Image (spheres, coloured by chain):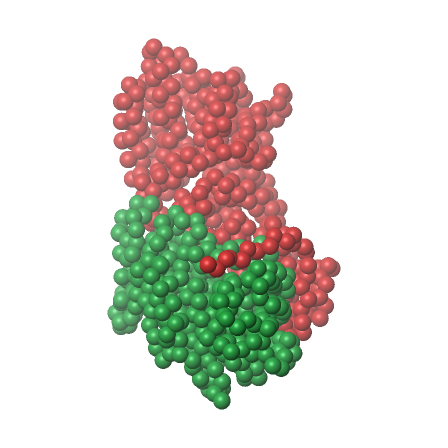
């Protein structure tokens, strides 16, 4: 009945055959990075539902099954992939150990991908057509995430410190936030700006986002906070995608003001539209400073490569989150389901949040170098501050300085890279 | 300290966001993948769709019940074989669904699975895979824990138990040798209360023989061994003379006979069917009821979910609607009864997914294992009246049920039969909707020969 080609529906027995498991084992053995991973998978606590295997072996089994399933998807063997999913689902749960939780969301994403493979259509639903409730849920989850994990604070504090340093001696400031969401980053900047001896003459934030309603709400909040700090504040909402902005007047850029561009990356939805367009804009703007925080996650390459990398990445994230909170934590569940689950889905089910037909950018920092920007070192106050921040969270987070960038990681895996850039003049 | 920004609770209005032409271009670029795209100006209230080449529905997913709406539309499209619409709705549902989200998202996920199977004719395969995966992870401990947790948070199952026990106790009052045939899959969680009642009621504690008929797959057999041990231990504790038997490996319930069940002449017989009749193939239901009659019981207790997947089985959309209605209630009930991060609830939801696939996407496969074609109380009544008359619950039993319901969160209540109104039996309601029907029956005075 469906037009889409129904692929080979072989009569494989539903249980995963041991022969395919052993071929999976060789994949695990060959890649040394992967063999290290099971240790993270084994950080399972006592499970509620009694199982015959222990946490370690469940983690390994899940890893094997997930890789097997991903391989099937990569080779368009959708029937076999579909056969594996119920087994993976039964072993996993969003309310279990971190291995079980990661697996639950990756299995969900694979299931979504299998269906979209059949439909031969991968474009994501435009966030705008989702309910306000859904967006609110997302932002509530972000607030929780901000509380239970240092990643957001790290991003915000580091960027704000770099911005503060760059604004020394400047009186007319225009911050362009390429993806403002609910503007969680800015009250912190307000605070340190008011501690300056020399007051600002003007301070404007231009926020880009996908919904005017949400932007205006953010604007109202920020204005209220800025006024409470006595800052001469102005807010400009811009609805749309970054890559579609071709004229600086759309951003309200004026002569005589110091522009700073701020960009916090995520995989929740696509904000750029066109990466090339975004570059053009940044080059056009030539702001005094660009602050950016990127996830250490590749967006290019083939499906299987992206899948494996994402599996490592989110295993570390789930481990980190799991370390502080109990299995029953509703807050943690909301963070994982609303945020991580959505990102994993975007990466696995849709092939990355961007689908503009262009080759996606791997590292914005590297690209900025090519178009005439130089790194601004974050060692010094930003690094010291980040170090202090991590001290307030469970042990296991790592901070590394590399070429002036700050990298936040969990154990031996780098999660975020914060960097700052200035035009080379 | 950084204050956090809280989102304003502005009232949401059904605004259609204006699409600038760049966004149109973006979407149009990706529709080269789609096949057979027509301009689907099907919804007259689309404000901006006329310029769009794509079936991008501007209609925002803004109402609280977006999942039932989209699912219904998809089922209709499948019934009409509207390929374009099917594609688009499956895609939308796929984007929004999640087995770990809110109720809407869960319903979307599990029904999407069934619709997808229906559209690709892979229902039976999917059902088999789901079943075998579930079997692997089942254990006595996990199953038992699940049932007990469910009984703790919701009267959904205990309602039927209490009602049935009440009827059984009344019907077998004064008898010395009791034989209960239990055709349910509740791991005998119903019987401890009954045993206790038997022990404390009378001076003379009667002898109880319990024969459990297992209709599910073979792996449940090992579980029943554990159950047997526990039951025997409990009976000893209660001081009730007790005998326990298990009958399994049956293909068809109507194969049961007095002999195979080891029913003795001097025994007072009760047959307890909790969710058993719906597992019988529709065509065989009359035969099973006649078989029950042939056992000559003093009472038959029937408990079933209040839903009709049977009379609509040849009309996909109608059947879909009813299935959606029932499972929406069920999922909402589960959501409100269990804690958010409950693994037990997750397992129950996954069990539902199998039933949903079975009912909606396996319609050509009969006799392939557990059917799940539920019928409503009035439908079962009609069937039962061929051989049985209602055995009304006495006041004590009704009081017991009322007391039970009081122990749970608000939202549950009891509906008693009106005078001379069909069907007999009592209903458990959740949020004003009848969800479980419990009834008791006794054989007609004269034996009616069925002349069709």
Along the viewing direction, whichever of A278 and B190 lies nearer the viewer: A278
Residue reaching furthest bottom? A425
Residue found at x 31% / y 33%: B227
Name the residue rendered at 41%, 56% in the picture. Answer: A148
Quadrant of residue B15 in the image?
bottom right
Quadrant in which the C terminus of chain B appears? top right
Relative vertical location of residue A114 with respect to residue B377 in this rendering, above or below: below
Residue at figure coordinates x 50%, y 76% from the top left: A167
Colour of chain B as rendered: red
Instruction: Residue A208 in the image: state x and y as whole percent.
Output: 58, 70
Residue B195: where, in percent of width, then height?
35, 22
**Which residue extends farthest right?**
B44
Residue A131, horizontal then vertical, whole percent: 60, 56
In the picture provided, is B408 more to the left or to the right than B181? right
The answer to whether residue B359 is above or below residue B205 is below
Q: Is there any visible trace of residue B327 in the rendered image?
A: yes
Residue depicted at 59% across the width and 24% down the height:
B417
Q: Total label count?
A: 0
Visible in this render: residue A24?
A: no
Q: Image check: B442 left or right of B81?
A: left
Image position, residue B117 (x, y; %): 51, 56
| Figure check: B24 above or below B200 | below
- The extreme front residue here reads A197
Name the colour assigned to chain A in the rendering: green
């Amino acid at each position: 009945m469906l037009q889409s080609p129904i692929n080979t529906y072989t009569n494989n027995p539903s249980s995963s055959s041991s022969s395919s498991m052993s071929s999976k084992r060789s994949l695990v053995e060959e890649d040394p990075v992967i063999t290290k991973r099971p240790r993270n998978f084994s950080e399972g606590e006592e499970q509620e539902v009694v199982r015959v295997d222990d946490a370690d072996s469940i983690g390994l089994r899940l890893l094997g099954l997930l890789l097997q399933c991903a391989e099937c998807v990569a080779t368009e063997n959708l029937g076999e992939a579909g056969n594996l999913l119920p087994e993976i689902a039964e072993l996993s749960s969003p309310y279990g150990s971190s291995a079980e939780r990661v697996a639950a969301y990756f299995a969900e994403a694979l299931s979504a991908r299998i269906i979209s493979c059949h439909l031969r259509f991968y474009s994501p639903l435009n966030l705008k057509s989702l309910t306000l409730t859904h967006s609110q849920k997302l932002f509530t989850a972000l607030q929780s995430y901000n509380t239970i994990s240092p990643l957001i604070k790290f991003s915000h504090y580091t960027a704000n410190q770099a911005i503060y340093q760059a604004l020394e001696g400047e009186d007319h400031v225009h911050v362009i936030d390429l993806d403002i969401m609910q503007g969680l980053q800015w009250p912190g900047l307000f605070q340190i700006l008011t501690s300056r001896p020399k007051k600002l003459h003007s301070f404007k934030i231009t926020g880009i986002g996908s919904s005017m309603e949400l932007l205006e709400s953010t604007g109202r909040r920020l204005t209220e906070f800025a006024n409470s700090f006595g800052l001469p504040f102005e807010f400009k909402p811009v609805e749309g995608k970054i890559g579609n902005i071709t004229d600086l007047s759309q951003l309200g850029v004026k002569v005589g003001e110091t522009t700073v561009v701020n960009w916090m990356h995520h995989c929740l939805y696509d904000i750029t539209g066109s990466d090339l367009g975004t570059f053009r804009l940044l080059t056009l703007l030539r702001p005094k400073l660009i602050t950016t925080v990127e996830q250490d996650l590749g967006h290019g390459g083939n499906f299987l490569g992206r899948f494996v990398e994402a599996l490592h990445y989110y295993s570390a994230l789930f481990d980190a989150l799991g370390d502080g909170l109990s299995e029953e934590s509703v807050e943690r569940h909301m963070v994982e389901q609303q945020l991580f689950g959505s990102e994993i889905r975007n990466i696995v089910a849709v092939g990355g949040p961007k689908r503009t037909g262009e080759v996606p950018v791997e590292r914005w920092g590297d690209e900025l170098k090519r178009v005439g920007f130089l790194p601004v070192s974050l060692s010094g106050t930003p690094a010291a501050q980040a170090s202090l921040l991590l001290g307030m969270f469970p042990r296991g987070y790592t901070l590394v300085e590399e070429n002036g960038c700050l990298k936040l990681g969990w154990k031996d895996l780098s999660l975020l890279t914060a960097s700052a850039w200035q035009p080379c003049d | 300290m950084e204050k956090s920004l809280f989102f304003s609770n502005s009232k949401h209005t059904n605004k259609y966001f204006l699409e600038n032409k760049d966004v149109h271009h973006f979407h149009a670029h990706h529709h080269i993948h789609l096949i057979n795209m027509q301009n689907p100006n099907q919804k007259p209230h689309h404000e901006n769709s006329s310029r769009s080449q794509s079936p991008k529905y501007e209609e925002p997913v803004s109402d609280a019940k977006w999942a039932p709406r989209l699912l219904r539309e998809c089922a209709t499209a499948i019934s009409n074989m509207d390929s374009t619409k099917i594609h688009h709705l499956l895609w939308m549902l796929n984007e929004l669904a999640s087995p770990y989200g809110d109720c809407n998202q869960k319903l979307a996920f599990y029904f999407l699975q069934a619709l997808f199977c229906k559209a690709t004719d892979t229902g039976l395969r999917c059902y088999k895979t789901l079943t075998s995966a579930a079997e692997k992870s089942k254990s006595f401990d996990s199953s038992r824990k699940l049932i007990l947790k469910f009984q703790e948070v919701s009267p959904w199952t205990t309602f039927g138990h209490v009602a049935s026990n009440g009827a059984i106790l009344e019907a077998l009052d004064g008898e010395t040798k009791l034989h209960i045939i239990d055709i349910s899959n509740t791991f005998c969680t119903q019987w401890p209360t009954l045993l206790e009642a038997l022990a404390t009621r009378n001076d003379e504690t009667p002898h109880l023989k319990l024969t459990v008929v297992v209709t599910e797959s073979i792996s449940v057999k090992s579980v029943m061994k554990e159950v047997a041990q526990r039951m025997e231990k409990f009976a000893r504790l209660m001081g009730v003379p007790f005998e326990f038997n298990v009958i399994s490996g049956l293909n068809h319930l109507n194969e049961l006979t007095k002999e195979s069940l080891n029913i003795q002449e001097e025994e007072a017989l009760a047959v307890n069917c909790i969710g058993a009749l719906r597992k019988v193939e529709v065509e065989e239901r009359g035969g099973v009821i006649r078989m029950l009659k042939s056992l000559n019981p003093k009472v038959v207790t029937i408990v079933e979910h209040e839903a009709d997947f049977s009379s609509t089985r040849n009309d996909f959309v109608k059947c879909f609607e009813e299935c959606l209605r029932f499972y929406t209630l069920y999922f909402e009930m589960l959501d409100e009864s269990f804690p958010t991060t409950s693994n037990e609830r997750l397992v129950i939801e996954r069990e539902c997914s199998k039933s949903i696939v079975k009912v909606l996407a396996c319609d050509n496969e009969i006799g392939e294992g557990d059917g799940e074609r539920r019928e409503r109380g009035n439908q079962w009544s009609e069937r039962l009246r061929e051989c049985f008359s209602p055995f009304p619950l006495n006041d004590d039993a009704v009081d017991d049920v009322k007391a039970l319901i009081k122990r749970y969160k608000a939202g549950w209540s009891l509906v008693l039969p009106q005078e001379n109104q069909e069907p007999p039996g009592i209903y458990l309601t959740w949020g004003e909707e009848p969800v479980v029907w419990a009834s008791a029956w006794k054989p007609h005075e004269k034996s009616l020969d069925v002349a069709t």
